[in-house]
Image (tube, rainbow, N blue to C red):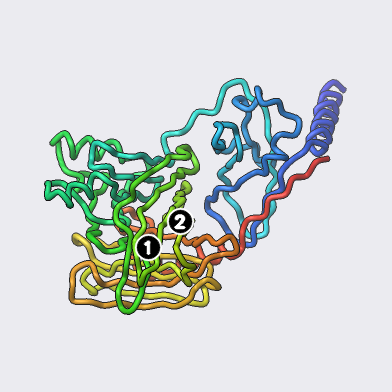
């Protein structure tokens, strides 16, 4: 009798716990596409319900279905106040998951695998960013000053460089230390990857400009930067550029750049300040020596290039809303840094130019041929056009 009574009591308590659980508030998350991993934003107005601000350092987000605690990251506003709560999730097509916010005893600490970015004044004002898949950099004012003054170590470019990494932990600080201390070179792969990519004055991996009368005009190096977020799920920053002139029109770009954990593609949101309205902004992928394979699907909004580099292969790509495509051009040139896939992109309803650009390296072991890179870009475009749905359920 004791055995059965004990079992009944456990069942009764379990049912009571489930009832209490079902009556609590939660976030419903669902997608029409599979997501091996994606970063979602929980609406702040709902996050605040039932929680005092003093508790926010001691919360976690739990997947109700399996009990797993999920990584999260706060985004802060200009005053340093919490503005958004990001959560990393895995989703199966049309399979709804429920997330709840719970209080814990210890604050959540950022894991080793994370996103990262920073300004690098010790290396001629680079700005460099990375996640667990890829790393990028672009060039700042000191690098341009050196070129104009005829001093060594300069770089004249607003293009986007790709750093071939094949480890999931951050390498930016480590590689700069190796390069600048003389202990080694980040142009040589000693196990973590290397900087094999040549940008020059090209657009590199998603640099921008304005195509006009068979010429691609572009800004010089960035002049100002602002780091907005670094953390386990997203890094975000702003870059400002001096105006450049095309056919008497002054064009000034301000870029909001972000990279999520698990993504091979950086997101670009670009505001234009111009003396006259411009019909489009041009986004480019360099084709280097024109010996790679260029491909795209205009209806789905993805563009790619697959090429041999240092006896390995790299795929670069752009993904965007296909309704924003004004025109496409494959520009082949015998001159260095002049060959590109060019996409003229019209602005959205908020007069912002939005696209994603990035790369994959076969040595990283996840995407190893052109077919797989094409499939990745197509899948990314499909997910982009079918965003994750997040809904707060307040019972």
User: Dividing the image into 4 quarters, which one contains the C terminus?
Assistant: top right
Q: Position of residue 379 (x, y in %)?
A: 51, 65
Numbered badge on residue 268: 2
Q: Residues within 10 Å of mark 2 (few under 14, many from 20)?
A: many
Numbered badge on residue 295: none
User: Dividing the image into 4 quarters, which one contains the N terminus?
Assistant: top right
Q: Secondary structure at mark 2?
A: strand
Depth check, front residue: 295 or 339: 339
Is 213 above or below relative to 185?
below
Is 223 above or below relative to 83?
below
Depth check, front residue: 375 or 270: 270
- Name the residue: 55% across, 31% down: 80
- Residue 22 appears left or right of 259: right
- Name the residue: 35% across, 53% down: 242
Q: Give yes or no for contact between labels 1 and 2 (Cβ–Cβ under 8 Å).
A: yes
Q: Secondary structure at mark 1?
A: strand
Which of the 4 image quarters holds residue 71?
Answer: top right
- Name the residue: 32% across, 67% down: 217
- Circle 1 residue: 208
- Name the residue: 44% across, 78% down: 327
């Amino acid at each position: 009798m004791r055995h059965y009574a004990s079992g009944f009591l456990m069942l009764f308590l379990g049912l009571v716990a489930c009832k209490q659980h079902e009556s609590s508030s939660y976030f419903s998350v669902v997608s029409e596409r599979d997501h091996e991993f994606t970063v979602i934003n929980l609406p702040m107005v709902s996050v605040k319900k039932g929680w005092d601000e003093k508790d926010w350092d001691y919360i976690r987000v739990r997947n109700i279905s399996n009990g797993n605690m999920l990584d999260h990251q706060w985004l802060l506003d200009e005053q340093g106040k919490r503005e958004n709560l990001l959560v990393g999730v895995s989703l199966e097509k049309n399979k709804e998951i429920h997330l709840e916010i719970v209080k814990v005893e210890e604050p959540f600490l950022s894991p080793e695998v994370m996103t990262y970015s920073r300004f690098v004044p010790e290396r001629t004002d680079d700005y460099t960013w990375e996640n667990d898949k890829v790393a990028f950099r672009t060039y700042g004012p000191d690098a341009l000053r050196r070129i104009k003054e005829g001093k060594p170590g300069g770089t004249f470019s607003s293009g986007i460089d790709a750093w071939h990494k094949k480890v999931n932990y951050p390498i930016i600080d480590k590689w700069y230390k190796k390069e600048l201390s003389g202990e080694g070179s980040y142009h040589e792969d000693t196990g973590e990857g290397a900087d094999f990519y040549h940008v020059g004055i090209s657009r590199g991996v998603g640099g921008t400009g304005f195509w006009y009368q068979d010429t691609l005009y572009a800004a010089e190096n960035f002049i100002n930067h602002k780091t907005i977020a670094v953390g386990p799920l997203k890094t975000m920053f702003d870059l400002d550029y001096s105006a450049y002139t095309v056919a008497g029109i002054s064009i000034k770009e301000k870029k909001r750049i972000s990279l999520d954990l698990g993504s091979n593609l950086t997101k670009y949101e670009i505001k234009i300040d111009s003396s006259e309205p411009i019909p489009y902004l041009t986004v480019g992928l360099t084709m280097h020596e024109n010996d790679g394979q260029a491909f795209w699907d205009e209806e789905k909004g993805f563009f790619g290039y697959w090429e041999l580099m240092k006896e390995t292969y790299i795929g670069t790509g752009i993904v965007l809303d296909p309704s924003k495509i004004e025109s496409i051009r494959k520009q082949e040139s015998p001159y260095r840094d002049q060959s590109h896939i060019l996409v003229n992109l019209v602005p959205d309803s908020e007069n912002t130019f939005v696209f994603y650009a990035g790369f994959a390296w076969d040595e990283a072991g996840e995407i190893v041929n052109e077919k797989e890179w094409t499939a990745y870009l197509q899948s990314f475009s499909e997910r982009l056009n079918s965003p994750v749905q997040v809904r707060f359920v307040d019972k």
